[in-house]
Structures are given as C-alpha cells and as structure tokens.
Amino acid sequence: MKNLNFSSVKKLEIILSGEHQAFATDLLDNAGVTGYTIINNLSGKGRHGFHEGHLMFNEEDVLIMIIAAVPEELVTPILEGLEPFYSEHSGVVFVSDIQVTRLVKFSS
C-alpha cells in the first residue's frame, strides 16, 4: 500500500449498561459522530467486582461498549454530555489517540 495518508483522531470507548444504549447513541448522533461500533455482552472486572457478559433476560441486562473515532473537537462536548450520566450510573469512557487512513469516513 503506497502513499497512505494518516490522520489523527480520537477513539472513544464508551462502556455502559445496554439499557442506556439509546442515550449514548443519541448523544453521539447529536454531536455529529458519523458512525460507531457497538459490542454487546462484555465481561470484566471493575470497582463493583466481576461482571460476566452473558445474556440474562435481554440485551438491556448486559454491558456494552460503543466505539467511535471522532475529530478532537468533538471529544469535549461528548464527554460533557456523558458526565451527568456517569454521576448516576456505572460505566467508563476511554479516550485514546489513533490514526486513520480514510479521514472522510470519520467526519461529516
């Protein structure tokens, strides 16, 4: 692959209960995020102990992760939108620097 042009963006990994998926995706959509990936049935250990990622009764009873690559200027508004949510609910957001080769896919 010749002449790959890399562009810097931020990766958000938003972990929360599946019952709040619509809240998070609405927030991303309203912020202008052009796409994201949702992974269901997460397992992991946190402050509240181990969480096993299997379906209990429905998809709302499990943890999910929403992954989005966004321009840096969207990070603060998204985190500000999530701040009140996380003061009431469990979960976490990871923010990291990444490089993408097709920037047009990540901007509106």
Image (cartoon, rainbow, N blue to C red):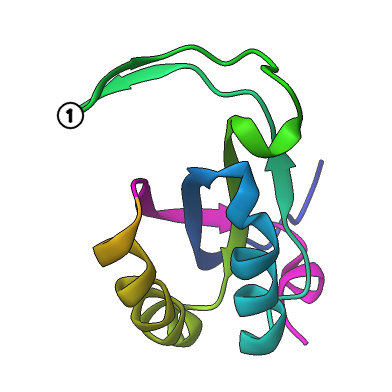
**Side of 39 where 70 appears, left or right:** left
At a point 79% along the width and 48% down the height, the residue shown is 2
Q: Is residue 98 magenta?
A: yes
Q: Quadrant of the C terminus?
A: bottom right
Count the labels in the image. 1
16 left or right, relative to 7: left
Residue 1 placement: quadrant: top right
Secondary element at image label 1: loop
Point out residue 60 in the picture as x, y percentages from the top left corner: 68, 39
Which residue matches tag 1? 47
Looking at the picture, does residue 46 appear above or below residue 83?
A: above
Viewer-closest of 53 and 108: 53
- The residue sitting at the left extreme is 47
Residue 105 or 80: which is nearer the viewer? 80
Q: Position of residue 26 (x, y in %)?
A: 69, 75
Q: Quadrant of residue 40?
A: top right
Residue 13 versus residue 81 in the image, above or below = above
Above or below, 49 against 81 in this view is above
Residue 26 is left or right of residue 96, and the answer is right
Which span is picked out in magenta?
A: 90-108
Residue nearest the observer in this picture, 46 or 106 = 46
Task: Give x and y (percent) for residue 90.
Answer: 34, 47
Residue 10 magenta: no
Q: Tell me residue 24's x, y (percent).
A: 59, 65
Is residue 80 shown left or right of residue 8? Answer: left
Q: Residue furthest front?
A: 57
Label 1 crowd (10 A; few <14 / some 14-19 / many >=20): few
Dividing the picture into quarters, in which one does residue 88 lie? bottom left
For the point 54% across and 55% down, which residue is it? Answer: 99
| Residue at 63% from the left image edge and 49% from the top image edge | 19
Residue type at the position of mark 1: Arg
